[in-house]
Image (tube, rainbow, N blue to C red):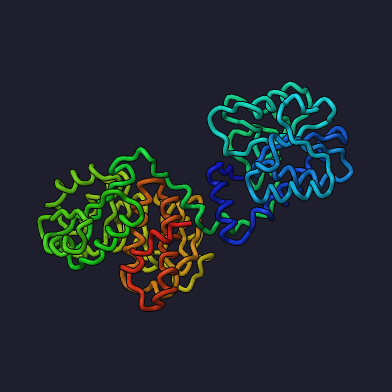
Amino acid sequence: MRIISWEEMQALDANCLYFGLLPLQLMENAGAAIAREVVASSPGKRVAIVAGRGNNGGDAFVAARHLSGYNATVYLLGRSRDISTEEARRNWKILERLQLDLREIKDAEDLMLDECDLIVDAIFGTGVRGRVSGLEAEAIDAINRSGKKVLSVDIPSGLGTNKAVRADYVVTFHRPKPDLGERVIVADIGIPPEAELFVGPGDLGLLKKRSSESHKGDSGRILVIGGGPYTGAPALTALAALRAGADIVTVAAPARAAKTISCFSPNLIVRELSEDHLSANDLQPLQDLIAAHDVVVMGMGLGRHPDTRDAIASIIPLAEKVVIDADALLPGLPLKGLVTPHAGEFQRISGISLIDLDYKERTELVRGYAWERGVTILLKGKVDLITDGEIVRANTTGNPGMTVGGTGDVLAGIAAAFYARASALRAASAAAFVNGRAGDLVYLEKGFGMLATDVVEMIPQAMRF
């Protein structure tokens, strides 16, 4: 079973809520799973549940309700009025109404751990960082001194800090997590495989956060190489990258196109190349530009001049992070980074036809190609597929109005902006979701009259949750 990181689990929780799987449902399932393990592992009927005021404690409140026939005491560290989530508060109130043995603890000396057969540790979940102090630190010390068998909920409280519970067993949820050791029970809490497959707002949370101490450029410098016969495509990509949070976007375009693109927006930095198409003569100035940017996104509007293909082949290896789209999707090129084809372009680079296949039938073909070439693929379609050859994600946002020209260029810009802050897989997953959601928000207002520029302007709203 694949290990899932704590941050990925938090993203999955957020996506479950987006899909309609409520935290209260997951808490109920988690608590029932804890109770089953208590029954299976406790040497006696007396159980002390030491709970914090967050969702970790909430899981344990549910477990207390399921422990019918056991002498369970719930020790809440602090006041019930300070329970931090609605789900945990609701389950505490149920216990109050059922007249279970509940004790609000102000001093760790009030923990009667000598009287129990098993301790359930539910003080902290994964959110605790730094140093643990005060009542919680004292409670952890009391648990560790007790000599009793300890079952931790999801994670030994304080793991990775200065104070951590020494657990005999850990009941963790959905998938194994890092650093939990060997005595781990993985409990199914009703998260279906599809919740891990389809992307959602939780994927935005996996992008590197903008710090209050950030300086210009820290959130991404993007170089767009495009234009020639077409001028709108690279401009759309550049504007989308800015709307998706990139700090600086530069467009390097052939001479005639550059003059037009520079008129589109004062927010764009435009660098004029030597000819009216991308050629090998531009490699030296582009090499300097590539070195000054975090991500290169290329292909939009370049056209098919014979010199251009050779130039693209020379440029791709120069970029540490590259998004390859549109006219740069040609057979035989040294692809790397993030590749964003539709089905026709995928056939052009791979020789693999996806026509008349649904997304499930396409999955293994696309995954296999990504693995073979060592790239991340974002295959655009009714259901977008994203894969690095190992993990596969899918996206269902978007609508038929997005067949209007330019929305693929917008997606490339969003993906480039996110790629500056995350891995190619995470960037592509979040970008597919945001691009489609922006299109859905535009559709509510303009229907099939949407334009690609409308989608660009809706990107900030699509990222807001």
350 lies above or below 131? below
As drawn, the residue found furthest toward the right would be: 69
Number of callouts: 0
Please identify the quarter of the rendering in which residue 114 is found. Answer: top right
Q: Position of residue 35 (x, y in %)?
A: 79, 44
Residue located 79% across and 47% down the image:
95
Q: Nearer the viewer, residue 459 or 357?
A: 459
45 lies above or below 68? above
- 385 horizontally vs 75: left or right: left
Q: Position of residue 21 (x, y in %)?
A: 63, 59
Q: Position of residue 102 (x, y in %)?
A: 79, 39
Q: Position of residue 186 (x, y in %)?
A: 69, 43
* Quadrant holding the N terminus: top right
- 345 horizontally vs 308: left or right: right
- Does residue 63 show up? yes
Residue located 74% across and 21% down the image:
145
Residue located 73% across and 30% down the image:
168
- Does residue 330 show up? no
Q: Nearer the viewer, residue 449 or 75?
A: 75
Residue located 69% across and 23% down the image:
141
As drawn, the residue found furthest toward the bottom would be: 448
As drawn, the residue found furthest toward the top would be: 145
